[in-house]
Amino acid sequence: MKTVILAGGLGTRLAEDTKIIPKPLITIGKIPILIHIMNIYSHFGFNDFIICCGYKGSLINDYFKSLDHEIIENKKHATTYLIKSNNWNVQCVYTGLKTNTGGRLLKIKSLLKNEKNFFLTYGDGLANLDIKRLLKTHIKNKNICTITAAQPPARYGVVKIRKNKIISFKEKFDHTNAWINGGFFVFNNEIFKYIKKNKDSLETNVLEKIIKFQKITAYRHNNFWHAMDTLRDKIYLNKMWYNQKAGWLA
């Protein structure tokens, strides 16, 4: 089962780093956050990744080339690596510089044609999430999308839940006591019926459509979750790592 990681954004709120490297390569304890995310999935036996690259995507390719690797396939806009030390299959796909989140997924549709279900997450969020339980919830509910609902700081988008069904989704809405989009998804391949163009936002276009048809499930995650949106987040996550209190490893 494949895991898609959206890693093409500009990361403007971390401009002190992203002027030089893409956000997913910003390090926590000298390890890119992208690798921390991949380790979460790999811990549960999911080792097949598609990295949707965009801004400074060549540097993500360079990073994988710096590891013990073998190039399995090399096309114009996609390179597939076998990372030997982890037994990871990694496809780095250039999905455009200004493509929106839904559009990035649309651009790799052909790579997911044989996947009934697949994981998707952003290249900047960490959690001590039980990936197998997330998948089990998705399969049990037989919906198009299962979204991980988390309870982080109030500055993130709000997810309203009723009997494990998501009834509304508001991005960047301040609320001090709410469930939010934790960014760890499972999608059924039917998701592509709801993505029409490269400008489509996964959050404000695609998910809103699915909610109207009640085809989206919430998986409530009550434990550690944190995104690296700002310099403050980067400092916080590094402090956790160096103090051996990295919550996403618990």
Image (cartoon, rainbow, N blue to C red):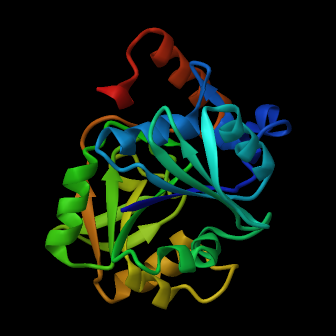
Residue 207 in percent (x, y) is at: 45, 76
Between 68 and 201, the one lying in front of the other is 68
Is 218 above or below relative to 205?
A: above
Q: Is residue 225 left or right of residue 200?
A: left
The quadrant where residue 66 appears: top right
Q: Is residue 153 visible?
A: no
Residue 157 in percent (x, y) is at: 48, 57
Count of number-bearing discs: 0
Q: Is residue 118 visible?
A: yes
Residue at image point 29% right, 82% down: 215
Residue at image point 73% right, 70% down: 99
Residue 14 in percent (x, y) is at: 73, 37
Residue at image point 61% right, 39% down: 69
Is 196 above or below relative to 122?
A: below
- In the rendered image, the quadrant that contains the N terminus is bottom left
- In the rendered image, the quadrant that contains the C terminus is top left
Q: Is residue 152 left or right of residue 18?
A: left
Between 106 and 88, the one lying in front of the other is 88
Between 98 and 85, the one lying in front of the other is 85
Residue 104 in percent (x, y) is at: 63, 70
Q: Residue furthest top?
A: 243
Q: Is residue 141 left or right of residue 70?
A: left
Residue at image point 74% right, 66% down: 75
Q: Is residue 38 left or right of residue 140?
A: right
Q: Residue furthest right?
A: 19
